[in-house]
Protein backbone atom coordinates (compact mmCIF):
# COMPACT_ATOMS: atom_id res chain seq x y z
CA UNK A 1 0.00 0.00 0.00
CA UNK A 2 1.37 3.40 -1.01
CA UNK A 3 0.89 6.37 1.31
CA UNK A 4 1.12 9.83 -0.26
CA UNK A 5 1.38 13.00 1.79
CA UNK A 6 1.61 15.28 -1.21
CA UNK A 7 -0.91 15.68 -4.01
CA UNK A 8 1.90 15.90 -6.59
CA UNK A 9 3.31 12.49 -5.61
CA UNK A 10 -0.18 11.00 -5.64
CA UNK A 11 -0.83 12.36 -9.13
CA UNK A 12 2.34 10.71 -10.46
CA UNK A 13 1.02 7.37 -9.13
CA UNK A 14 -2.45 8.07 -10.53
CA UNK A 15 -1.12 8.81 -14.02
CA UNK A 16 0.89 5.57 -13.93
CA UNK A 17 -2.24 3.57 -13.05
CA UNK A 18 -3.19 3.85 -16.76
CA UNK A 19 -6.39 2.06 -17.70
CA UNK A 20 -7.03 0.59 -14.24
CA UNK A 21 -10.55 1.24 -12.90
CA UNK A 22 -10.21 3.30 -9.71
CA UNK A 23 -12.51 3.06 -6.68
CA UNK A 24 -12.33 5.91 -4.18
CA UNK A 25 -13.36 6.20 -0.53
CA UNK A 26 -13.00 9.77 0.81
CA UNK A 27 -12.90 9.94 4.64
CA UNK A 28 -11.89 12.11 7.55
CA UNK A 29 -10.18 9.14 9.24
CA UNK A 30 -11.07 7.50 12.58
CA UNK A 31 -12.18 4.62 10.40
CA UNK A 32 -14.87 2.23 11.61
CA UNK A 33 -16.86 -0.70 10.27
CA UNK A 34 -18.97 1.64 8.12
CA UNK A 35 -15.84 2.87 6.31
CA UNK A 36 -14.57 -0.69 6.12
CA UNK A 37 -17.71 -1.71 4.22
CA UNK A 38 -17.11 1.08 1.67
CA UNK A 39 -13.49 0.05 1.22
CA UNK A 40 -14.45 -3.62 0.83
CA UNK A 41 -17.02 -2.74 -1.83
CA UNK A 42 -14.42 -0.74 -3.73
CA UNK A 43 -11.81 -3.49 -3.45
CA UNK A 44 -14.37 -5.94 -4.89
CA UNK A 45 -15.46 -3.69 -7.79
CA UNK A 46 -12.39 -1.69 -8.79
CA UNK A 47 -8.88 -2.60 -9.97
CA UNK A 48 -7.30 -0.19 -7.48
CA UNK A 49 -8.75 1.43 -4.37
CA UNK A 50 -7.77 4.89 -3.17
CA UNK A 51 -8.58 6.08 0.36
CA UNK A 52 -8.22 9.72 1.37
CA UNK A 53 -7.95 10.81 4.98
CA UNK A 54 -8.41 14.53 5.44
CA UNK A 55 -10.18 16.33 8.29
CA UNK A 56 -11.63 19.16 6.24
CA UNK A 57 -11.82 22.33 8.36
CA UNK A 58 -14.15 24.20 5.99
CA UNK A 59 -17.04 21.84 6.77
CA UNK A 60 -16.91 22.38 10.54
CA UNK A 61 -19.22 25.11 11.78
CA UNK A 62 -18.09 24.51 15.36
CA UNK A 63 -14.36 24.92 16.21
CA UNK A 64 -14.68 22.59 19.26
CA UNK A 65 -16.04 19.83 17.03
CA UNK A 66 -13.03 20.22 14.73
CA UNK A 67 -10.55 20.26 17.65
CA UNK A 68 -11.88 17.05 19.15
CA UNK A 69 -12.34 15.16 15.87
CA UNK A 70 -10.64 11.79 16.58
CA UNK A 71 -7.17 11.35 15.03
CA UNK A 72 -6.05 7.71 14.72
CA UNK A 73 -3.82 7.69 11.68
CA UNK A 74 -1.72 4.63 12.61
CA UNK A 75 -4.79 2.47 13.23
CA UNK A 76 -6.45 3.82 10.06
CA UNK A 77 -3.45 2.90 7.93
CA UNK A 78 -3.37 -0.58 9.42
CA UNK A 79 -7.07 -1.10 8.67
CA UNK A 80 -6.65 0.28 5.14
CA UNK A 81 -3.79 -2.12 4.46
CA UNK A 82 -5.68 -5.09 5.87
CA UNK A 83 -8.70 -4.27 3.71
CA UNK A 84 -6.62 -4.13 0.52
CA UNK A 85 -6.39 -0.36 -0.15
CA UNK A 86 -3.76 0.37 -2.84
CA UNK A 87 -3.10 4.07 -2.21
CA UNK A 88 -3.80 6.46 0.66
CA UNK A 89 -3.86 10.22 0.09
CA UNK A 90 -3.15 12.44 3.10
CA UNK A 91 -3.34 16.00 1.78
CA UNK A 92 -2.47 19.10 3.81
CA UNK A 93 -4.62 22.24 4.08
CA UNK A 94 -2.25 24.53 2.15
CA UNK A 95 -2.09 22.03 -0.70
CA UNK A 96 -5.77 21.23 -1.00
CA UNK A 97 -6.85 24.85 -0.38
CA UNK A 98 -4.20 26.23 -2.69
CA UNK A 99 -6.64 29.11 -3.32
CA UNK A 100 -7.14 29.85 0.40
CA UNK A 101 -10.81 28.75 -0.05
CA UNK A 102 -11.58 31.65 -2.45
CA UNK A 103 -13.45 29.25 -4.70
CA UNK A 104 -16.30 27.10 -3.42
CA UNK A 105 -19.09 24.83 -4.63
CA UNK A 106 -22.44 25.98 -3.24
CA UNK A 107 -25.79 24.24 -3.63
CA UNK A 108 -28.62 26.67 -3.02
CA UNK A 109 -31.62 24.55 -2.04
CA UNK A 110 -31.36 21.12 -0.40
CA UNK A 111 -28.06 22.04 1.33
CA UNK A 112 -29.85 24.78 3.27
CA UNK A 113 -32.30 22.29 4.85
CA UNK A 114 -31.91 19.54 7.50
CA UNK A 115 -28.24 19.54 8.67
CA UNK A 116 -27.49 22.59 6.51
CA UNK A 117 -30.01 24.64 8.46
CA UNK A 118 -28.23 23.81 11.71
CA UNK A 119 -24.61 23.86 10.46
CA UNK A 120 -24.00 27.00 8.45
CA UNK A 121 -21.64 26.50 5.52
CA UNK A 122 -21.23 22.78 6.26
CA UNK A 123 -22.27 21.48 2.85
CA UNK A 124 -20.36 24.16 0.96
CA UNK A 125 -17.24 22.88 2.75
CA UNK A 126 -18.15 19.26 1.97
CA UNK A 127 -18.96 19.87 -1.72
CA UNK A 128 -15.85 21.97 -2.24
CA UNK A 129 -13.46 19.44 -0.75
CA UNK A 130 -15.14 16.49 -2.48
CA UNK A 131 -14.95 18.33 -5.82
CA UNK A 132 -11.22 18.90 -5.27
CA UNK A 133 -10.65 15.27 -4.24
CA UNK A 134 -12.59 13.95 -7.25
CA UNK A 135 -10.51 16.10 -9.57
CA UNK A 136 -7.29 14.84 -7.98
CA UNK A 137 -8.22 11.14 -7.75
CA UNK A 138 -10.27 10.88 -10.98
CA UNK A 139 -12.14 7.79 -9.77
CA UNK A 140 -14.51 5.58 -11.75
CA UNK A 141 -16.56 4.91 -8.60
CA UNK A 142 -16.73 6.91 -5.36
CA UNK A 143 -18.42 5.32 -2.36
CA UNK A 144 -20.50 7.16 0.29
CA UNK A 145 -22.48 5.80 3.23
CA UNK A 146 -26.23 6.41 3.35
CA UNK A 147 -25.95 7.40 7.01
CA UNK A 148 -25.02 10.82 5.61
CA UNK A 149 -27.85 10.64 3.09
CA UNK A 150 -28.14 14.40 2.58
CA UNK A 151 -24.41 14.53 1.88
CA UNK A 152 -24.68 11.64 -0.60
CA UNK A 153 -27.62 13.29 -2.44
CA UNK A 154 -25.84 16.63 -2.66
CA UNK A 155 -22.64 15.05 -3.97
CA UNK A 156 -24.55 13.00 -6.52
CA UNK A 157 -26.40 16.17 -7.57
CA UNK A 158 -23.11 18.08 -7.88
CA UNK A 159 -21.61 15.31 -10.05
CA UNK A 160 -24.66 15.51 -12.34
CA UNK A 161 -24.86 19.33 -12.44
CA UNK A 162 -21.15 19.84 -13.09
CA UNK A 163 -20.75 16.95 -15.58
CA UNK A 164 -18.22 15.06 -13.47
CA UNK A 165 -16.96 11.71 -14.72
CA UNK A 166 -17.41 8.65 -12.57
CA UNK A 167 -20.26 7.26 -10.52
CA UNK A 168 -21.29 8.29 -7.01
CA UNK A 169 -22.25 5.05 -5.28
CA UNK A 170 -24.53 4.94 -2.19
CA UNK A 171 -23.79 2.17 0.34
CA UNK A 172 -26.06 0.99 3.18
CA UNK A 173 -25.68 2.33 6.72
CA UNK A 174 -23.86 -0.13 8.96
CA UNK A 175 -25.30 -0.43 12.47
CA UNK A 176 -24.25 -1.84 15.81
CA UNK A 177 -26.47 -4.67 17.16
CA UNK A 178 -28.31 -1.97 19.15
CA UNK A 179 -29.30 -0.23 15.91
CA UNK A 180 -26.93 2.73 16.45
CA UNK A 181 -25.28 3.73 13.17
CA UNK A 182 -21.47 3.52 13.27
CA UNK A 183 -19.92 6.99 13.34
CA UNK A 184 -16.44 8.33 14.15
CA UNK A 185 -18.08 10.61 16.70
CA UNK A 186 -19.54 7.71 18.74
CA UNK A 187 -16.21 7.39 20.62
CA UNK A 188 -17.13 10.63 22.42
CA UNK A 189 -20.35 9.20 23.89
CA UNK A 190 -20.18 8.66 27.65
CA UNK A 191 -21.81 5.65 29.31
CA UNK A 192 -25.22 7.34 29.61
CA UNK A 193 -24.98 8.54 25.99
CA UNK A 194 -24.17 5.02 24.78
CA UNK A 195 -27.30 3.71 26.48
CA UNK A 196 -29.51 6.43 25.00
CA UNK A 197 -28.07 6.80 21.49
CA UNK A 198 -29.76 3.68 19.95
CA UNK A 199 -33.16 5.19 20.82
CA UNK A 200 -32.70 7.61 17.91
CA UNK A 201 -32.85 4.78 15.36
CA UNK A 202 -35.59 2.95 17.26
CA UNK A 203 -37.84 6.03 17.34
CA UNK A 204 -37.14 6.88 13.68
CA UNK A 205 -38.78 3.59 12.76
CA UNK A 206 -41.81 4.09 15.00
CA UNK A 207 -45.32 4.86 13.75
CA UNK A 208 -45.38 8.19 15.66
CA UNK A 209 -45.42 11.50 13.76
CA UNK A 210 -42.20 13.49 13.30
CA UNK A 211 -43.32 15.93 16.01
CA UNK A 212 -44.09 13.08 18.39
CA UNK A 213 -40.69 11.42 17.76
CA UNK A 214 -39.01 14.78 18.46
CA UNK A 215 -41.02 15.12 21.67
CA UNK A 216 -40.10 11.62 22.85
CA UNK A 217 -36.40 12.17 22.07
CA UNK A 218 -36.47 15.44 24.01
CA UNK A 219 -38.11 13.69 26.95
CA UNK A 220 -35.32 11.08 26.91
CA UNK A 221 -32.68 13.84 27.14
CA UNK A 222 -31.72 14.49 23.50
CA UNK A 223 -31.44 18.08 22.24
CA UNK A 224 -33.28 17.63 18.94
CA UNK A 225 -32.18 19.58 15.84
CA UNK A 226 -34.83 18.07 13.59
CA UNK A 227 -37.01 15.07 12.78
CA UNK A 228 -38.24 15.50 9.21
CA UNK A 229 -39.88 13.27 6.62
CA UNK A 230 -39.01 13.98 2.96
CA UNK A 231 -37.29 12.45 -0.09
CA UNK A 232 -39.06 9.14 0.79
CA UNK A 233 -37.02 8.98 4.01
CA UNK A 234 -37.25 10.06 7.60
CA UNK A 235 -34.26 12.08 8.84
CA UNK A 236 -33.22 13.07 12.36
CA UNK A 237 -30.37 14.88 14.08
CA UNK A 238 -30.06 15.21 17.83
CA UNK A 239 -27.36 15.96 20.37
CA UNK A 240 -26.44 14.16 23.58
CA UNK A 241 -24.29 15.52 26.44
CA UNK A 242 -23.32 19.05 27.36
CA UNK A 243 -20.86 21.72 26.22
CA UNK A 244 -17.64 20.51 24.59
CA UNK A 245 -18.63 16.91 25.41
CA UNK A 246 -21.78 17.15 23.35
CA UNK A 247 -22.08 14.54 20.54
CA UNK A 248 -24.29 15.21 17.52
CA UNK A 249 -25.92 12.09 16.08
CA UNK A 250 -27.59 11.93 12.68
CA UNK A 251 -29.54 9.10 11.12
CA UNK A 252 -32.16 8.40 8.46
CA UNK A 253 -34.19 5.45 7.20
CA UNK A 254 -36.29 4.82 4.09
CA UNK A 255 -40.02 5.38 4.71
CA UNK A 256 -40.72 1.71 3.94
CA UNK A 257 -38.92 0.88 7.22
CA UNK A 258 -41.19 3.18 9.23
CA UNK A 259 -43.96 1.29 11.08
CA UNK A 260 -47.54 2.18 10.12
O1 LIG B 1 -18.31 12.03 5.19
C1 LIG B 1 -17.16 12.47 5.41
O2 LIG B 1 -16.32 11.83 6.06
C2 LIG B 1 -16.77 13.84 4.86
O3 LIG B 1 -17.85 14.71 4.87
C3 LIG B 1 -16.10 13.77 3.47
C4 LIG B 1 -17.08 13.23 2.43
C5 LIG B 1 -14.88 12.88 3.51
C6 LIG B 1 -15.68 15.17 3.04
O4 LIG B 1 -14.77 15.73 3.92
Image: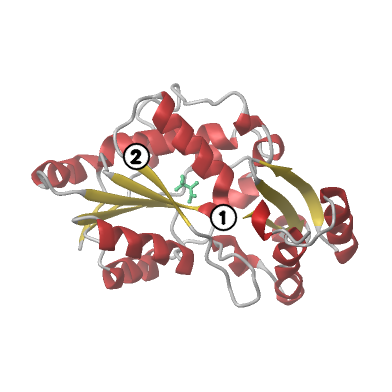
Q: Is residue 161 left or right of residue 209?
A: left
Question: On the image, numbered disc 1 is attached to which residue?
Answer: 147
- Specify the quadrant that holds the N terminus: bottom left
Classify 10 Å Cα crowding around label 2: few (below 14), some (14-19), many (20 and above).
many
In the picture shown, does residue 228 fall above or below 104? Answer: below
Q: Is residue 56 left or right of residue 189?
A: left
Report the residue at 74% width, 56% height from top: 239
Asked if the beta carbon under badge 1 is closer than 8 A to the nearest atom of ligand 1, the reply is no
In the picture shown, does residue 40 fall above or below 163? Answer: below
Quick one: 20 or 242, which is closer to the camera?
20
Q: Residue 65: in sight, yes or no? A: yes
Question: On the image, numbered disc 2 is attached to which residue?
Answer: 133
Residue 63 placed where, x, y %?
Answer: 62, 45
Quick one: 202 or 182, which is closer to the camera?
202
- Specify the quadrant that holds the C terminus: bottom right
Residue 23 placed where, x, y %?
Answer: 28, 51
* Whole-number angstrom distance, CA of label 1 to CA of label 2: 21 Å
Classify 10 Å Cα crowding around label 1: few (below 14), some (14-19), many (20 and above).
many
Amino acid sequence: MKVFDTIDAFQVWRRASGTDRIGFVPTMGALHIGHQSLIERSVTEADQTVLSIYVNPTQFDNPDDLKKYPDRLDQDLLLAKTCGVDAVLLPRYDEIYVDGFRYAVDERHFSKTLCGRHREGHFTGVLTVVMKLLNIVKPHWTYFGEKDYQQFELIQGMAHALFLDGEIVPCPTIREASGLAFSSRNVHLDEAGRQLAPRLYALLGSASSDAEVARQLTELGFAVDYVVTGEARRFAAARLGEGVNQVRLIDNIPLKQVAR
